């Protein structure tokens, strides 16, 4: 771990606040009487665009906020760095030279949804950094093997072409194995495992009407995690809606 810079907040009493002290709670308490300068840019993601577009901003804090770079494009950021001659991590240059687009140079959380695909370039461009990552996360090598697969919620056209002739997965059998036969073989997040009985109920009650696409969503939801049961609730509705639609279609064909 590197030494924090001088301007880092290290000894604030809020750091020892009893209970949860996340970013939102900290800002609300520390800057209640001031104005916050927030470095969000709408070009970074749809989520950040929605946050800035929301005039109430209740999901962030209730204080006054100022967004000086909200409309900056990726090119504006790099132009500012160049004109001010600012220092930045060398890894970004190595990634760019390796072919990573400038709007994908995001490594703030190595195993996040958006930065995982960039992590594979680290192994190819910076051996020293990659060794440090592996010492901290021994399973980091999985990114190199499966970065372009459903494990990381992605699959490029090239991978789909390579797997075109492979046997299709039986997601119904996989869900049955995961939920009832051999759950110990799978790694399920604790927050999802805590309501596993709801998933089992869904599987049993929709056994005769669910389709492969539904079982695929069910399987992915169990492995990726569904702490707020959003996928579970959507599946209940989707399965029965699709079933009713099939019945109506069959009835219409019967009339003709």
Image (cartoon, rainbow, N blue to C red):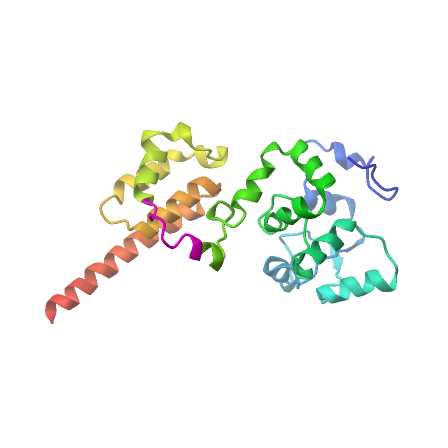
User: Would you say the magenta stretch is mainly helix, strand or loop?
Assistant: loop
Where is residue 36? Give x, y as percent. Answer: 77, 54
**The image quarter in which residue 41 lies:** bottom right
Which is nearer the eye, 5 or 48?
5
**Magenta includes 32?**
no
Q: Residue at x 71, y 66 (%)?
A: 73
| The N terminus sits in image quarter | top right
| The C terminus sits in image quarter | bottom left
Label count reads 0
Q: Residue at x 53, y 43 (%)?
A: 145
Q: Is residue 68 visible?
A: no
**Which region shows up in magenta?**
161-170
Which is nearer the eye, 140 or 34?
140
Where is residue 49? Give x, y as percent. Answer: 63, 62
Position of 253 with respect to 121 (left or right) is left
Q: Residue furthest left?
A: 255
Q: Residue at x 22, y 60 (%)?
A: 246
């Amino acid at each position: 771990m590197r030494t924090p810079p001088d301007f880092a907040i290290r000894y604030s009493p809020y750091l020892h606040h009893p209970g949860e002290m996340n970013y939102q709670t900290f800002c609300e308490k520390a800057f209640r009487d001031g104005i916050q300068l927030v470095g969000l840019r709408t070009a970074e993601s749809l989520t950040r665009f929605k946050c800035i577009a929301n005039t109430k901003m209740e999901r962030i804090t209730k204080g006054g906020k100022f967004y000086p770079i909200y409309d900056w494009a990726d090119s504006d950021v790099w132009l500012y760095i160049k004109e001010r001659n600012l220092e930045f991590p060398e890894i970004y240059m190595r990634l760019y030279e390796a072919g990573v687009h400038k709007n994908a140079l995001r490594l703030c959380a190595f195993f996040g949804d958006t930065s995982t695909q960039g992590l594979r370039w680290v192994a190819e461009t910076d051996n020293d950094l990659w060794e440090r990552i592996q010492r901290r996360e021994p399973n980091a090598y999985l990114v190199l093997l499966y970065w372009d697969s459903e494990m990381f919620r992605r699959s490029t056209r090239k991978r789909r072409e390579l797997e075109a002739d492979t046997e299709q997965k039986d997601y119904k059998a996989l869900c049955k194995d995961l939920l009832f036969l051999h759950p110990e073989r799978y790694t399920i997040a604790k927050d999802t495992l805590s309501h596993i009985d709801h998933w089992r109920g869904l599987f049993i009650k929709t056994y005769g009407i669910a389709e492969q696409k539904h079982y695929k969503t069910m399987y992915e939801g169990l492995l990726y995690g569904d702490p707020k049961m959003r996928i579970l609730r959507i599946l209940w509705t989707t399965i029965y809606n699709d079933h009713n639609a099939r019945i109506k279609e069959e009835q219409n064909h019967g009339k003709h």
